[in-house]
Amino acid sequence: MNETVSGPRHKPLQLHVPEPGVRPGDAPDFSEFEIPRAGAVRRPGIDEAPEDMRDMAFSVVRVLNKAGEAVGPWAGRLTADDLRAGLRHMLTLRQFDERMLKAQRQGKTSFYVQNLGEEAVACAFRMALEDGDMNFPTYRQAGLLIAGGYPLTEMMNQIFSNGADPLKGRQLPVMYSARDHGFFTVSGNLGTQFIQAVGWAMASAIARDTRIAAAWIGDGSTSENDFHAAMVFASSYQAPVILNIVNNQWAISTFQGMARGGAVTFAARGHGFGIPAIRVDGNDYLAVHAVARWAAERARAGLGPTLIEHVTYRAGAHSTSDDPSAYRSKEECDAWPLGDPIDRLKRHLVTIGEWSEERHSQALAEITDAVRSAQKAAEANGTLITGPHPSPRAMFDDVYAEMPAHLVRQRQEAGY
């Protein structure tokens, strides 16, 4: 017995459980979030050693200032045409979200995940890649497909699980798959694709190819084992991969501090693996594109992986199965200090004389009409409530080059 005459030698231990600073009903407070002024963060060379750029993991790369001007060393890589295309991509994604959210409420699909507030992350990143590069996304990177030119009707067919579903009903809605568009199948098992992306990048290097990979994970999923395994392999083999952490402040109901633990930033986790790490303003289209392009150039030059923490905010619910008012303030979204990505890019284009309110209204009307037309075409192929649906026969297809006898028997017994 480790006791003295006066009682136990040590005080009882206490378990630390991270707590968000604000609860529902409280006033939002982002006072501890340090935001550097736009253009203040340096741009290292792509060959700078990880140990010499540790500062990049504790700041935030920003290009657009409050006046809508692009400033600093990360600016100047996009033309006005590029920027207009980026704005249209984000507007398309937002309109797509609105239509599909309503469709879910109408029972036309069972499930949907919005990208609201995070449009710049995927849309800008995709434009920094080349055709043939492969993304291993989560369920909130639909912008990769839209910016990559994937047909909206095909996306909707998959969401509706109808007879034209390119995945033949084998995946949950929004878990797209488009190999030809550099979009690996979305997995509902969180974190798995982080390590898969590293393996794909290693295979590309072994084959002496020129294509790179991009891994995607949410802040909450960084607590999964696959995140750490991916970091080890990416570091050890200097894989040509970009490791993206989308820090949108909230997992389905827990704030980002649960997964971050005692670390100051998610980007800082790269330091323990010898991986260069950068934080970027995820609501700044120009900044996301610039950092993504920097990391892509580094990977193609044979200089290994880069970890990017995209600092953004999930403005909507985690999914149509979630009610965020149960765990965060209703006013928190409006208080988010990095603003709305669409409004910020629009303001920049207006500031440089390449856009106007009239052109914006016209573009929005055109995009709304295009999304509505795509939905009409998809619904002609069926919805969850109207059918037709993929044939059950499809469960036997595309697995074996030559179907084993026992599956042939099962298919025959099922009448397919």
Image: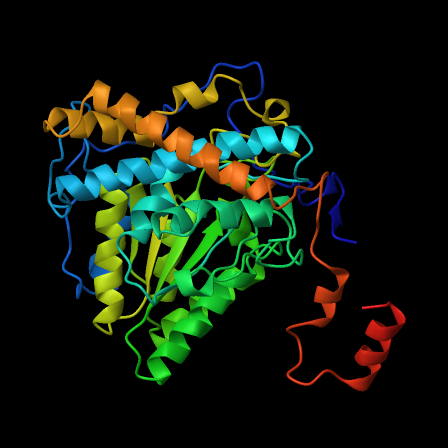
**As drawn, is 119 to the left or to the right of 138?**
left
Q: Residue at x 32, y 52 (%)?
A: 126
Relative side of 52 to 93, left or right: left
Residue 124 spot, x, y in % from top left: 30, 46
Residue lying furthest right: 413
Q: Which image quadrant: the C terminus?
A: bottom right
Residue at 17% across, 30% down: 349
Against 129, is 29 above or below? above
Location of residue 71 (image quadrant): top left
Residue 44 image offset from top left, x and y in percent:
15, 55
Image coordinates for residue 158, horizontal then vertical, percent: 58, 50
> In percent of the image, x 64 and y 73: which residue is there?
398
Which residue is more in the foreground, 104 or 72?
A: 104
For the question of whether residue 331 can be seen, the reply is: yes
Q: Quadrant of the N terminus?
A: bottom right
Name the spot of residue 195 as percent of width and height, x first: 49, 67
Query: In this image, 403 relative to 229: left or right?
Result: right
Position of residue 322 relative to residue 269, above or below, is above
Quick check: 243 left or right of 356? right
Give the quadrant of residue 299.
bottom left
User: Which residue sits at x=34%, y=79%?
Assistant: 205
The answer to whether one can see residue 117 in this image is no
The chosen color scheme is rainbow
Q: Give the tally of numbered discs.
A: 0
Between 2 and 98, the residue placed more toward the observer is 98
Please tell me whether residue 352 is drawn above or below residue 267 in the rendered image.
above
